[in-house]
Structures are given as structure tokens and as C-alpha cells.
Image (cartoon, rainbow, N blue to C red):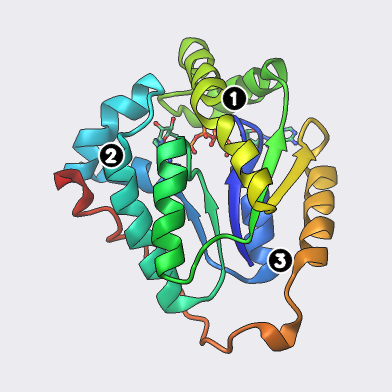
Amino acid sequence: MRILMIGPPGAGKGTQGALIAAHFDIPRVVVGDLLRDHVARRTNLGRVVDGHLGRGELVPDEIMLCIVRQTLNATRAASSGYVIDGLPRTMAQARAAYKIATELDMSANVAVHLRAEDKELTRRLLARAALEHRSDDTEQVIRHRLDLYQQVTQPIIAWFAQRGILVSVDAMRPVGEVGREILAALELMRPPAGHIPARVRRPVDLTGLGARCAQT
Ligand code: AP5
């Protein structure tokens, strides 16, 4: 299974992406975590993207597409499947990432779309802020992230639907209920075991990813 997670901030992309990756035993890439890790390590990429993350702005497409290529190459070396959380977020990213993935024979066969209302999303993110202190989990920045999602990311959903890969789920319900519905839908779409390429499963080392992407 090659799966993209899409949905507004706080919809549960990380929460459900982890469940899916464990269920299907496939590597998971969390783009936000990758970027925050670079910020924490003060790498070149981290210094470039720090302000974007703090303000809730999207990181420029050129940097993200460099990361896409590296991510797909790294996952391809280890597995025929993946869960990618956080990509694409702009139509330009969607089209370019599709082209790169097709060249590598790694294009997604499912996009899991999590739907939820802004009021509930804000509640979840402010609750997380009390525990985790993410720089973008403030009321003002959350508002901006939600607006950006509506304006820039939401249009990609219709494109996924046209490609016939969209699975759209009501994410307003409790975590377990949402997860069960997603796994049931994905099980129906899972390729028969005999069709899965017998590629050896190895852990994917993501620590070096993005290291050269700040120069793009
Ligand atoms: P990223 O880290 O991806 O942030 P986000 O999209 O805002 O998503 P969140 O992690 O806040 O929410 P989530 O949907 O994963 O929900 P979660 O499971 O964590 O990206 C951060 C930044 O990186 C972006 O703003 C941008 O700057 C940059 N970036 C990333 N990708 C980019 C790209 N492609 N292009 C350009 N820039 C990019 O859950 C949230 C909380 O809710 C948790 O506390 C969880 O426990 C709780 N929760 C989850 N589900 C439920 C439920 N069903 N009921 C109750 N609580 C729940």
C-alpha cells in the first residue's frame, strides 16, 4: 500500500498514519516531524524553515520537492509501500510529486482524507499545546494554518478523487472509531498477497533526509 494522509491541522494525520503504518508494516514519513527535527538540530535546512513553521506558513515548494525525491528514494530502497503524512499541500507539489513518484514507480494508490470542523480542530491543537509546546500551536497560528489548508491544500482533494484514489473519512469521531473505518476501507483496497513484490523489508533511515534541500 502506498498511502498519502491529507487533512487539516489536528485532523489526526499523525495519529491515524501511525496506526496504518503499524497495521500494514510499511514505513511512515511524517514531513512535519522531519522539518522540526532539522530545526532542533540547527541544520541548514532547519535554519531556512524555522520561521515558516513558527508562523504556520508553508515551506517553499522547491524545498519540499527536493524532500519528496529523497523520501521516495529512501523508502523505495526499503519497501514497496509507505505512509506519507503532510505531502502534498499545494497543487504544484501534488503534480510534481506525482511525476517524481511515477518515474520511480512509487505513485500513491490511496489518499486518506480526514474531514473535521475548525472548532474541534482548534480545541485539539490547543489541548496539545498545553502538553507539547509546538511553536505553531497558538490560537493565532492555528487560525492561519486552518485558513491556508482551506485555500491552498483543500483543492488537491478533488484531484485525488479524479485519480480514483480518495478515501474520505469523518474524523470528528473518537480516534478508535476513525481508525477502524480507515483500516476497513484500506483492507478492501489491499492488493492480493501474491501481487506484492517480494522486496526485502528494511528499516528506512530518514535522519539524513532533506540535508541538501536547503540549497535548492
Ligand atoms: P505538520 O506537522 O504536518 O502539521 P499539521 O498539518 O498542522 O498537522 P498536525 O500535526 O498539527 O495535526 P495532525 O493532522 O497530524 O493531527 P495529530 O494526529 O497530530 O506540519 C507542520 C508545518 O510543517 C506546516 O505548518 C508547514 O509549515 C510545514 N510543512 C509540512 N508539510 C509541508 C508541505 N508539504 N509543504 C510545505 N510546508 C509543509 O492530532 C492532533 C491532536 O489531536 C493530538 O493531540 C491527537 O492526540 C488529537 N487527536 C487526533 N485525532 C483525534 C480524534 N479523533 N479525537 C480527539 N483527538 C484527536
Q: Are marks 3 and 2 in contact (CB under 8 Å)?
A: no
| Mark 2 closeness class: few <14, some 14–19, many ≥20 residues within 10 Å | some
Residue pointed to by mark 3: 23
Q: Does the residue labelled 1 lie within 8 Å of ligand 1?
A: yes
Q: Where is residue 49 in the image (x, y as percent from the top left)?
A: 27, 34
Residue 11, given in percent of the width and then of the height, sits at 66, 33
In three-dimensional space, the C-alpha distance between marks 1 and 3, rounded to whole angstroms, equals 26 Å
Residue 105 vs 67, above or below: the answer is: below
Would residue 70 be found to the left or right of residue 118 on screen? left
What kind of element bears circle 2?
A: helix
The percent coordinates of residue 42 (x first, y second) are 20, 41
Q: Check disc 3 and report its element: helix, strand or loop.
A: helix
Badge 1 marks a residue whose secondary structure is helix
Q: What residue type is labelled 3?
A: His
**Rendering quarter of residue 172:** top right
Vertical placement of residue 73 versus 77, above or below = above
Q: Residue 149: which quarter of the image?
A: top right
Q: Check disc 2 and give the amino acid type.
A: Val
Q: Can residue 160 be seen in this view?
A: yes
- Residue lying furthest top: 140
In which quadrant of the rendered view does residue 36 lie? Answer: top left
Task: Find residue 125 and name its label.
Answer: 1
